[in-house]
Amino acid sequence: MSHPISFDEFDGMFTALRHSAWRLESRRRYAWDEQQGTYRQFLAEGRVDWDLNDPWCKERREQTALGKRFERVRIVDEPLAEGQRYLLDNARRNAAVGEVIRVLARSKADELGLPREDFWLFDARVVALLRFDGADEMTGVDLVTDPVEVLRYAQVREAAWHHSVPYDELAG
């Protein structure tokens, strides 16, 4: 009950939303991250000097200034995988531009029966499922609009949010 959309259509959803965008991030690593200079800096220094004026940050600040909420729960391993440690540092940047980041132990996510798929829930009415290949490269996005399926993802959001903690509790 889903259909593929282009990466441009997916990107446009972040400014077209009316109220909220919420993400479940379940992967241990993202190949895209590892191709960035910030990832190399993180490996070398254990932290990143984030550019809070890059286009992504500017867009996120503009959208939050309009009253839109951006939230996510990152499922993390114990101990953290290298890519998860990078994303934990990246949460400082996300938080600085208005996004709320929480983390949830993978063991708890498994206990709750949360899905292993990454997705965004927009305005609690449409889901963007992110597809990845075996090399952890994002290969596409599928849109889900069936109300019954969207409700299932909204229930995942509620469970993940309830059992997660602010990212800085784990980082600190």
Image: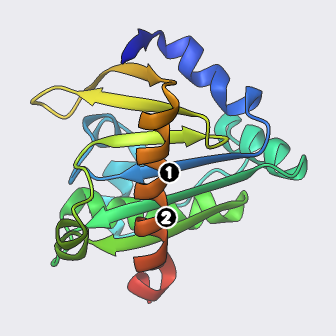
Rendering coords of residue 159 (x, y %)? 41, 68
Rendering coords of residue 103 (x, y %)? 40, 71
Q: Is residue 120 left or right of residue 58?
A: left
Rendering coords of residue 29 (x, y %)? 23, 49
Q: Are marks 1 and 2 in contact (CB under 8 Å)?
A: yes
Q: Is residue 160 left or right of residue 97?
A: left
Q: Marks 1 and 2, how far apart in space?
A: 6 Å
- Asked whether residue 48 appears in the rendered view, the answer is no
Question: Three-letter amino acid code at disc 1?
Answer: Ala
Res 137 → quadrant:
top left
Q: Is residue 86 above or below residue 119?
A: below
Check the picture and name the quadrant holding the C terminus: bottom left
Check the picture and name the quadrant holding the N terminus: top left
Q: Residues within 10 Å of mark 1 (few under 14, many from 20)?
A: many
Report the front residue among 94 and 75. Answer: 75
Q: Residues within 10 Å of mark 2 (few under 14, many from 20)?
A: few
- Residue at the farthest left position: 134
Q: Which mark is residue 158?
A: 2
Helix, strand, or loop for circle 2? helix
Residue located at (41% from left, 40% from top): 119
Residue located at (74% from left, 30% from top): 15
Q: Is residue 50 above or below residue 110?
A: above
Q: Which residue is mark 1?
A: 154
